[in-house]
Amino acid sequence: MSRKPDIQTMLWMYKHMVLSRRYEEALAEAYLEGKQPLFNMANGPLPGEMHLSNGQEPCAVGVCAHLLDHDVVTATHRPHHIAIAKGVNLRAMTAEIFGKQTGLAGGRGGHMHLIDPAVNFACTGIVGEGLAPAAGAALARKMRGEDGIAVAFIGEGAANQGAFHETLNLAAVWNLPFVCVIEDNSYGISVPKGAATSVLHNDVRAASYGIRGYHVEGNDPLRIYEVAGEAIERARAGKGPSLIEIETYRLAGHFMGDAESYRPAGEKDALFARDPIPKFRQELVDAGAASSDDLLWIEEDAKSCVAELIDFAKAEAYAPVQEALEKVFV
Amino acid sequence: MMAAEKKRIRKLTIAKAMSEAIDQAMTSNPDVFVMGEDVGKLGGVFGTTTGLFDKYGPDRVRDTPISETGFIGAAAGAAVMGMRPVVELMFIDFFGVCMDVIYNFAAKNSYFSGGRQAVPMVLMTSAGGGYSDGGQHSQCLYTTFAHLPGLKVVMPSNAYDAKGMMTAAINDDNPVIFIFHKSLQGMGWLGTAKGAIVDVPETVYEVPLGKANISREGSDITVVGFGNTVHHALDAARDLALEGISAEVVDLRSLAPLDRETVLASVRKTGRLLAVDDDHLSYGWTGEVIASVAEAGIALKCPARRIAYPDVPVPFARPMEQFLLPNAEKVKAAVLSLMNSVVSV
Ligand SMILES: Cc1ncc(C[n+]2csc(CCOP(=O)(O)OP(=O)(O)O)c2C)c(N)n1
Ligand SMILES: [Mg+2]
């Protein structure tokens, strides 16, 4: 059932990986404004916590390449790569991350609370919270006989939350069009997966709930595409939920300002040597999917797109402060 | 020795004071141990367990999975068996994933056992916003816990109290929710109210739980605060003194038990009352304090007033969040307006 992406899809995947990376780099730069030499999280145009997704782009594009606007996605405190691949309005999202009036929530949400109903995307700052609502979205689609499935993205750390186990059982018992995607980046903040998780790979836990479990190695966008394609096709065909664990890695800290002292010496260098973006680029060229020049054009385009987004968001106004009192109820 | 100790000033942050109290308790009592996310090598995201992992090892300083239902429940269960766990919930905002075992088990176990089975655990957790961390990482939620019988709910406003209250909390035979405020914690990356970093003795001592503190004496008005709002009150009081107004600042230090006596005595003296909270206004402790004064029949010279966080979630955008938060200027303005108003008859 699994199949490889066509050239157009591969280029879409590459483009969104690059766009996501440039986006995170631009946010990182803006984040540090006003925070040097003294790092105080409250300062600068981007105050608060900032969780970047550098390195995890393959998970987002490999899964979202199969999704349409009516498919529901819930993501986590590390949401940008997934939001970008799901097609969230990037001007409104960037304005939201900068806390501006034209942001998705008028500045009320911020980077961990991006909600774009137009493409059925949402994320949360509470580990594991997105799982059950995604299953509920799948339930709604099923009860109404509507098209569309739901995908909950979580980190490997979230697979130890009660919500993970309750939701998988529920999705299985009700045969919901639901896929849980675990981005295993080896750490929950400073705690390595092995110190927190009783099994080596979380996909084996699928067996406890009688659902399909898939494991994808190598942070490889093409493999992710194939496996996600199978799981999503099954969900669309009413064949029930799946659990996919993807081995990925974060090239950034847990959040901006993380000293990453918990990493073994040399780990970071080894990860950078396996950066999925140059690797995928080479594969595309080798496979004759695109010339280096074509890809250069994609890369330049991503850069200017991101620059335009950041300029736009910075120039936007904050909402009048009284608006903080509005929208508690619809 | 006393003289030498007296001279030595040792200013600590609340984070350092908390970890020192836990350290000393672990040294003297093998039943004391620590659990939580990132409390091991990292020393706690908010520095509450700095140095403990190196000193006591992974058996007594346990990094947990992200399984709050599991490890906080396990802390309660171990406490029933006589251990004295100090367990960290990284942000108070996260209590939603683990509340059952806190309020239906730990808080009720003494009652359900006819007082025969104690749950001597400490749940330490961070609270408060002001640094734009969004609405799931900036809440206070103190009174949510204080509303539930069977839990002691405390928060220090400075490092001296932090150490003494942590020691008292560990020694207490009941479950204690030990809240620390991020604006006072002393983490370099967060910014800290200067008044929170104070001289802390090296010796082991207790600050009794359930006892409010008069942080500044005054005669014209009583300003009651808790945690960070104590500092807003103190800053305002300093300013007001220049304008000839003498404000007394009461630091509650504990919501449960609530030291009504200290508040009532102060209000009897000043005849005016302002309560300042950074938790949501409605059903908050400010209402409880004002009700206590009303029930005591104390005649006030002007209506009591409260400042609290409005009944809306915490917005991300800095201007909006700062607009909603209490601060020294708001306290000062409220005091000035109260001093100019009278009770209508
Ligand atoms: C219920 C809950 N507990 C703890 C946290 C604090 N926290 C935020 S992110 C994180 C680590 C999450 O690890 P993982 O699920 O692997 O995602 P990653 O950060 O690696 O993307 C923790 C413990 C939280 N936000 N919510
Ligand atoms: Mg992780």
Image: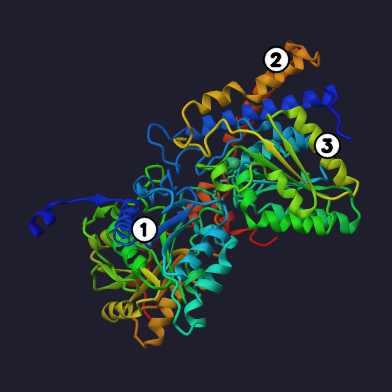
C-alpha distance separating marks 1 and 3: 57 Å
- Residue A296, numbered circle: 2
Count neighbours of disc 3 (C-alpha within 10 A) and say few if under 14, some if 14 to 19, many if 20 or more: many
Residue drawn at the location 32% of the way across and 81% of the way down: B261
Task: Say which of B96 and A160 sits in front.
Answer: A160
Residue drawn at the location 41% of the way across and 32% of the way down: A36
Which residue is disc 1 drawn over?
A: B328
Disc number lying in front (2 or 1)? 2
Q: Secondary structure at mark 1?
A: helix
Q: Amino acid at mark 2?
A: Leu
Tell me residue A34's x, y (percent): 44, 35
Q: Is residue B303 left or right of residue A96?
A: left
Q: Is residue B23 left or right of residue B8?
A: right
Tell me residue B26's x, y (percent): 33, 58
Count neighbours of disc 2 (C-alpha within 10 A) and say few if under 14, some if 14 to 19, many if 20 or more: few
Tell me residue A330's x, y (percent): 70, 60
Q: Are circles 1 and 3 on residues that touch, CB within 8 Å?
A: no
Disc number lying in front (1 or 3)? 3
Tell me residue B18's x, y (percent): 34, 56
Q: Are marks 1 and 3 on the same chain?
A: no
Q: Is residue A196 above or below residue B76?
A: above
Q: Chain of mark 3?
A: A
Q: Secondary structure at mark 2?
A: helix
Which residue is disc 3 drawn over?
A: A229
Q: How is the image coloured?
A: rainbow
Q: Are circles 2 and 1 on residues that touch, CB within 8 Å?
A: no
Figure quadrant of the N terminus of chain A: top right
Count neighbours of disc 1 (C-alpha within 10 A) and say few if under 14, some if 14 to 19, many if 20 or more: some
